[in-house]
Image (cartoon, rainbow, N blue to C red):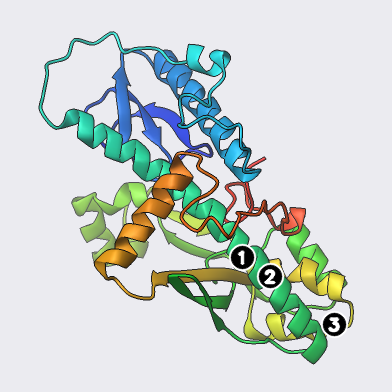
Amino acid sequence: MKTNRRGDDAFYADLDEESGLYCVFGNQSGHAYGSYASLEEAKTTAKGLEEMFRETMMARKYRSREMAKNLFESASPAAKAGLKKSSRDYETVDGVEMCASINVVEDTLAALRELHEGDVKVAMQNRTVALGAQHHKHPGNYFGEEGDGEASLQIKKRASNSKLDENQVAMLTQYGIPFETVPNSYKLNPKYVENETLMKKVNAALNKIPDMPDDIWVEVPGKAIVNDESIAAVFRLNDKDTINNLLPLVTTLAVAATLKETSAASLKRAFARVSAALNGDLDVVDKSKKVKARVETLPQFARKKKPTYNNKE
């Protein structure tokens, strides 16, 4: 079961497009975890799962030695009470349990990866700001390594399909940082695209069509976007704090991490490392290297509604 919609939380309730049932979905994968007779039941279960998820990730964020061993043990009684069993009748089908387990682990792993990528991106941000303020230019992409892992660490220009909001435009303008403005445009209203008869008329004589709908063309709002000069202008500023504040508005951070080798021993260590993290084991594989809590965050205004590299509050 799938849904095209994505919620803001780790779990959300929505109408499944394939089955027509109300389901609870994981935000990262879109997998459904159960079907319900009513939207209210699905929302209640989604809320319970979300509370469990947030409590577990908060515990991992601060690496508490007292954290429970898994997602459900770490949840409060109130969160567990939010879960409701579906009232539907079921038949036993081999493989369902494993599929469901893989789905929930997949979503938990995605959140865990986001958490650890946040550590890497904080380090990238700090390095980029320090070198950029010192040399007044983009310090360039670089490579990082740790133990079995290595990564290409890239500081990219913010994508052109990511528009600057009013506050971001105001901040860039305040410091004289240039950006581009894409004007309003128009496109064919999607609700008419599959009307073959109408489309043939449009193709034949757009301006002569009788009874032409007045909303067949829809306006696409203009937007402000970042260009190459935006990044260069930020690095030309003299104040390190200002560079730190503006950089997330004009760049995105990308981490392409891989294992240095894919030998059996390396893969075994990777599985052990991730398994330890999922189970809340702080001593991981290398007991000589204690895991440190990372609480640094990028500037508050740089956070997206659905965070990419800051931890959820």
On residue 121, the disc is: 1
Disc 2 marks which residue?
A: 125
Against 64, residue 210 (above or below) is below
Whole-Å distance between the Cαs marked 2 and 3?
16 Å
Q: Amino acid at mark 1?
A: Lys
Above or below residue 265? Residue 131 is: below
The residue under label 3 is 237
- Identified by mark 2, the residue type is Gln
SS for tag 1? helix
Q: Are marks 2 and 1 in contact (CB under 8 Å)?
A: yes
Secondary element under disc 2, as helix, strand or loop, is: helix
* Residue 174, image x, y percentages: 87, 70
Q: Nearer the viewer, residue 301 or 259?
A: 259
Mark 3: amino acid: Leu
Q: Residue 286 versus residue 86: which sits nearer the camera?
A: 286
Residue lying at the far front of the rendered structure: 288
- Where is residue 84? Give x, y as percent: 40, 12
Q: Which picture quadrant has residue 234?
A: bottom right
- Mark 3 secondary-structure assignment: loop
First along the sequence among labels 2 and 3: 2
